[in-house]
Amino acid sequence: MKSKVYFSRAITPEKVVELYELLGKELGGKVAIKLHSGEVGNQNFLKPDFWAPIIAKVGGTVTECNTAYDGGRDTTEKHLKTLKLHGWSEHFDVDLLDAEGPDMVLDIPNGKKIKKNFVGKNLKNYDSLLVLSHFKGHPMGGYGGALKQLSIGIASSYGKAYIHGVSDVSKIWTADHDSFLEAMADAALSVVEYFKGNAVYINVMKNMSVDCDCCAVAEDPCIKDIGILISADPVAIDQACIDLVYAATDDPGQKHFLERVESRNGVHTIEAAAELNVGSREYELIEI
């Protein structure tokens, strides 16, 4: 059976809540809300005021993890300052999952490239997961969406290096590229299995630069805003976003955006995740 992906061309905070209610999947217990806090200097990330209504609706805790590269979020001290600077800790309960070690290790016996995933140990305090993704390009992954949030996003600082290096952290920026993409799929699998399906994914196709929100100096958006998508399937929602970009043939920025995705073989993460049964590339897009 095809996975359901609900889609709205209107992009408002209220529409995010409407789509969540339409999906009808209740997130129980203590909810971890994974989003991107935004690198200091980045102009494109989605701000607290955009996400506030859905966070209030779910009543969860905003969660993040430290980065593996230099910047405003690579140590707990700096990341906490950034969370305050960008307004997250001012408006919401915030939990930096890997603020203190040791990491929690999720085993991936069926992983293609990695057999372990190192995540912030505080993940153990949550019963369900809401992944709020700003869909955009990415310098290494080609694109960033639900699968990247599940993998690199929830990995600890060490875990991020472990995925990038395909288990060898000394090769964080030099590992075989397709193997890195497959390692991301492995890591995503481990988080999906950890939450046993108690997860919802929202991708917002707005402010779409070829660069990630992790870039302090990012290109301005190059393609027009497309809409909001929601699904219980992270593979389906990312595939639907990619397909919507390919469908935007009248957009003068489409070619530039797709060059970033294709030059990094971005769809391979989706292919690998589907092979691991993280989700399905077959979906029904239900436009609202």
Image (cartoon, rainbow, N blue to C red):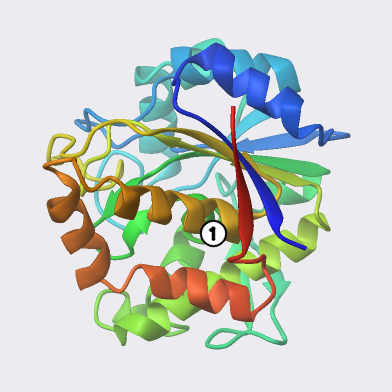
Q: Is residue 205 above or below residue 143?
A: above
Image quarter where the C terminus lies is top right
Image quarter where the N terminus lies is bottom right
134 or 95, nearer to the observer:
134
Percent of width and height locating residue 179 = 41, 85
Q: Residue at x 83, y 58 (%)?
A: 196
Residue 253 placement, left or right of 97: left
Q: Residue at x 15, y 39 (%)?
A: 222
At label 1, which amino acid type do we have?
Ala
Residue 285 visible somewhere in the drawing: yes
Q: Residue at x 33, y 64 (%)?
A: 141
Q: Is residue 186 above or below residue 13?
A: below
Q: Is residue 263 above or below residue 275?
A: above
Q: How many marks?
A: 1
Percent of width and height locating residue 16 = 58, 23
Percent of width and height locating residue 163 = 46, 73
Percent of width and height locating residue 72 = 29, 38
12 or 97, nearer to the observer:
12
Residue 99 placement, left or right of 77: right
Q: Residue at x 88, y 34 (%)?
A: 29
Reading the image, the residue beneath label 1 is 155
